[in-house]
Image: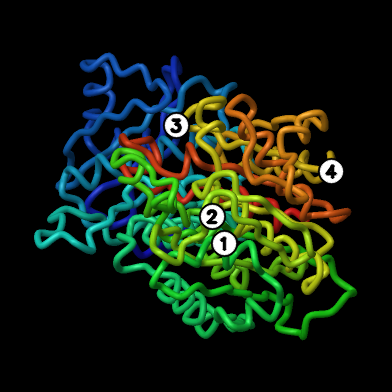
């Protein structure tokens, strides 16, 4: 979808469909909708009254007038306006325009309770994310699609803020769509090598620095935990390091340095502790953290945050074979910590352990945030829509929680209870990679904390919200691209 801005009134823009917002329980139509009503000879008001349209948040209606579709999206009570309400209204309105056959949509900057920049960003994010589709493997593509979105803002005083918001919204949405595309791609077509190629292509397109380590180089770095997971697969592992430097200047210690670590298990069979067929079905999604990091890194040059960002991905499959790591084997991580493998299906924390060590030792990061589809226990605790957050620094956790709220991506902080470290004890090594079922998400977080050391660190467990089995307001069934917009908000707020 192409996005443009028009400094005209909504009724003056040439488009197949127009989208306007309406607050609940307000008799007076807002200016844009009132103009459309006058141009249609009062038809807008008559339809709204005939349908008893309440303008509840998420409610949508439409009519045809003067050769085009007029879509009205409910915004709910004015006092309860949030960016997420506007995103969902834009998504629902854009889908209705698409389903009506519109190719070009013009939309006013919805609402009036929030700053224009924030409302414009929400409008564009909602419209693009709400109409996302993954059709790579379909012979018959969708016949109806909105190809152009025009954001209408007639007030010249708000033009710069609106343009800023539109730019951010488009950048955030396209980064999320890239992550969704990668997660939705079957594992057969997205091996660790393929994932590394995506990183190299992104680096070339966006002028990022990139380094890809092969198995031998990872072995020289001492990444025994990561390579232990990769041991059973015929696909070679790849460790990817992307770097964004503000202004294109070489990386330097004068700026804050942030490392984003994404779990990159391109397919998780469980290894020798094989998953059930049902549990294995969606395991192409186990690289959703890596996909999020790639989407974020590709977006940073357009957003130009004043921080140095390193994207790290330990990409591998977790497969059973004669060379696979066995339960009871002991692996040695990059920092020298030995790990007894209590279960080969707790593989993500092993790959992340070495990636965290790399972030501490080689990147020398000031802050580390890892994103991973790590535990079913987090899904049990928080359900399929909410990510779990754990951190060793309260200020970092607070910034991430605020960013998640602003992005409309539910997130809840879980405690890192020191007493639970007892569950990770091993009789033969420094750590065991699994504990008991109870508190499984927390013990996984405690395991990762050991490899972050004294560096400020946070862990986002996105096992629940990374993939949806039903259509959501901003995402169809499939990959959601969760954490992309949260972390872009966090990075650009620095």
Going by the image, does 278 lie left or right of 123?
A: left
Position of residue 222 measured from the top left corner of the image (x, y, whole percent): 71, 73
Badge 2 marks a residue whose secondary structure is: helix
Q: Which mark is residue 289?
A: 2
Mark 1 element type? helix
- Say which label, 3 or 4, has the lower sequence index: 3
Residue topped by disc 4? 393
Q: Residues within 10 Å of mark 2 (few under 14, many from 20)?
A: many
User: In this orientation, which residue lies closer to the viewer: 265 or 127?
Assistant: 265
Q: Earlier in the sequence, mark 1 or mark 3?
A: 3
- Sequence order check, earlier mark of 2 and 4: 2
What residue is shown at x 65% (from left), y 60% (from top)? 331
Of the numbered discs 2 and 3, the one sitting upstream in the chain is: 3
Left or right, 99 with respect to 482, comes to: left
Q: Are marks 1 and 2 in contact (CB under 8 Å)?
A: yes
The picture quadrant where one finds residue 31 is: top left
10 Å crowding of disc 4: few (<14), some (14-19), many (20+):
some
Q: Which residue is mark 1?
A: 293
Residue at coordinates 64% horizontally, 60% vertically from top-left? 261
Contact flag, marks 2 and 4 (Cβ < 8 Å): no
Label 3: element kind = loop
Mark 1 surroundings within 10 Å by alpha-carbon count, few (fewer than 14), some (14 through 19), many (20 or more): many
Label 1 and label 2: CA atoms lie apart by 6 Å
CA separation, marks 4 and 1? 21 Å
Towards the viewer: 341 or 314: 341
Closer mark to the observer between disc 3 and disc 4: 4
Where residue 135 sits: x, y (%)?
A: 22, 59
Mark 4: secondary structure: loop
Disc 2 to disc 3, C-alpha distance: 42 Å
> In terms of depth relative to the viewer, which is nearer, 294 or 247?
294
| Residue in the picture at 21% in, 16% down | 50
């Amino acid at each position: 979808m192409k996005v443009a801005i028009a400094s005209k009134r909504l009724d003056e823009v040439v488009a197949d469909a127009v989208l306007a917002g309406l607050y609940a329980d307000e008799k007076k139509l807002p200016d844009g909708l009132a103009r459309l009503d006058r141009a249609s000879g009062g038809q807008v008001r008559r339809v709204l009254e005939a349908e008893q349209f309440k303008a509840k948040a998420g409610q949508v209606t439409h009519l045809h007038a003067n050769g085009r579709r007029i879509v009205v999206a409910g915004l709910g009570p004015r006092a309860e306006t949030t960016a997420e309400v506007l995103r969902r209204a834009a998504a629902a309105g854009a889908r209705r325009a698409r389903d009506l056959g519109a190719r070009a949509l013009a939309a006013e900057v919805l609402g009036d309770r929030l700053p224009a920049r924030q409302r414009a960003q929400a409008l564009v994010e909602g419209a693009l994310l709400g109409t996302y589709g993954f059709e790579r493997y379909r012979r018959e593509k969708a016949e109806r699609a909105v190809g152009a979105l025009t954001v209408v803002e007639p007030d010249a005083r708000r033009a710069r803020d609106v343009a800023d918001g539109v730019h951010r919204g488009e950048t955030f949405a396209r980064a999320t769509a890239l992550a969704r595309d990668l997660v939705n791609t079957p594992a057969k077509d997205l091996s660790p090598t393929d994932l590394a190629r995506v990183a190299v292509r992104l680096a070339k397109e966006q002028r990022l620095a990139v380094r890809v380590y092969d198995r031998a180089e990872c072995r020289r770095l001492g990444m025994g935990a990561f390579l232990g997971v990769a041991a059973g697969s015929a696909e070679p592992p790849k460790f990817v390091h992307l770097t964004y430097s503000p202004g294109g200047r070489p990386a330097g210690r004068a700026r804050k340095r942030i490392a984003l670590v994404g779990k990159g298990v391109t397919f998780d069979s469980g290894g020798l502790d094989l998953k059930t067929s049902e549990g294995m079905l969606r395991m192409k999604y186990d690289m959703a953290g890596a996909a999020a990091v790639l989407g974020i890194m590709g977006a940073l040059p357009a957003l130009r945050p004043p921080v140095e960002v390193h994207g790290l991905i330990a990409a591998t499959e977790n497969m059973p074979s004669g060379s696979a790591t066995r339960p009871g084997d002991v692996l040695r991580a990059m920092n020298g910590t030995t790990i007894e493998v209590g279960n080969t299906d707790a593989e993500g924390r092993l790959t992340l352990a070495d990636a965290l060590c790399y972030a501490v030792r080689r990147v020398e990061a000031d802050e580390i945030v890892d994103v991973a589809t790590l535990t079913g226990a987090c899904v049990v605790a928080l359900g399929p829509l909410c990510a779990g957050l754990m951190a060793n620094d309260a200020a970092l956790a607070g910034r991430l929680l605020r960013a998640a709220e602003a992005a409309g991506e539910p997130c809840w902080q879980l405690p890192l209870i020191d007493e639970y470290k007892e569950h990770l004890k091993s009789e033969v090594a420094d750590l065991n990679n699994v504990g008991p079922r109870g508190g499984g998400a927390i013990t996984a977080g405690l395991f990762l904390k050991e490899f972050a050391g004294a560096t400020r660190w946070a862990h986002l467990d996105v096992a629940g919200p990374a993939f949806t089995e039903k259509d959501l307001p901003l995402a169809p069934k499939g990959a959601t691209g969760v954490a992309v917009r949260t972390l872009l908000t966090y990075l650009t707020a620095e």
